[in-house]
Amino acid sequence: MGFIKKLYNWVLSWAETSYAIPALFMLAFAESSFFPIPPDVLLIAMALSRPESSLWYSTICTAGSVFGAMGGYIIGYAFWQAVGTYFFLYVPGFTEELFNKVCQSYEENSVFIIFTAAFTPIPYKVFTITAGVSKISLLPFLLASIFGRGARFYLLGILFRKFGQQAREFIEKYFNLLTLLVVIIYFLAFYLVPVIFK
């Protein structure tokens, strides 16, 4: 957890630099294929700083995430035999049990699964890589990723565009409670989501 906390703080540090937008794109790209910190962290920090640009930030985040999803798909499709062990050992939330269950579930409804993973806190990288391993059709995969990720990030963008200052005050007032809530949500996503695929 100490390592994750350091990564979290490092991500936040980019929000106040001139490289914030490229950092947001790269973070969104990496999170869809191997990085453990979600891009929402940086997106929210940037949107709070400049609410009038929040929809632009959402666009950057969506684009980076979809390109990252394609990267995850390629990893699974072409390189899984070489790199699979790395993901099981070093990527939080990427367990062999979950990986196998997701692969099996793609046989029934791959588009719905990708959309759900893209929109929710479920570790998306598990699903992009298993999509490649399972060799599901690329076009439905991309469309589900675009709509799922777009819905997630534009929802945040719209909220901060409309309630920028109020949102900032609310977050600052209830920061500890919100932090605990986020930790609980990600705990549930990482450790309880395998139940869905039983």
Image (cartoon, grey):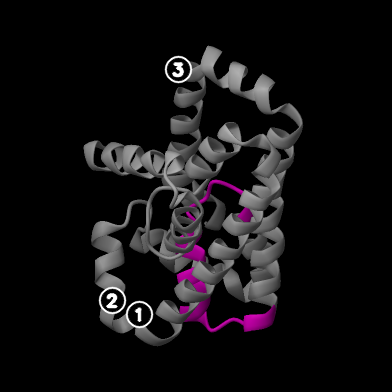
Q: Earlier in the sequence, mark 2 or mark 3?
A: 2
Q: Quick check: is 119 in the magenta stretch?
A: yes
**Marks 2 and 3: which is nearer the front?**
3
Q: Residues within 10 Å of mark 2 (few under 14, many from 20)?
A: few
Quarter in which the N terminus is drawn: top left
Q: Which residue is mark 3?
A: 176
Label count reads 3
Q: Which residue is mark 2?
A: 83
Q: Are marks 2 and 1 in contact (CB under 8 Å)?
A: yes
Q: Which residue is mark 1?
A: 80
Q: Are marks 1 and 3 in contact (CB under 8 Å)?
A: no
The three-letter amino acid code for the residue at tag 3 is Asn
Q: CA distance from mark 2 to mark 1?
A: 5 Å
87 sits to left or right of 150? left
Q: Which residue is nearer to you in this view: 152 or 55?
A: 55
Query: Which residue is rendered at x = 56% and y = 52% of the image?
Result: 196
The three-letter amino acid code for the residue at tag 2 is Val
187 sits to left or right of 109? left
SS at circle 2: helix
95 sits to left or right of 77? left
Query: Which residue is rendered at x = 59% and y = 81% of the image?
Result: 136
Q: Earlier in the sequence, mark 1 or mark 3?
A: 1
The three-letter amino acid code for the residue at tag 1 is Trp
SS at circle 1: helix
Magenta span of residues:
118-139
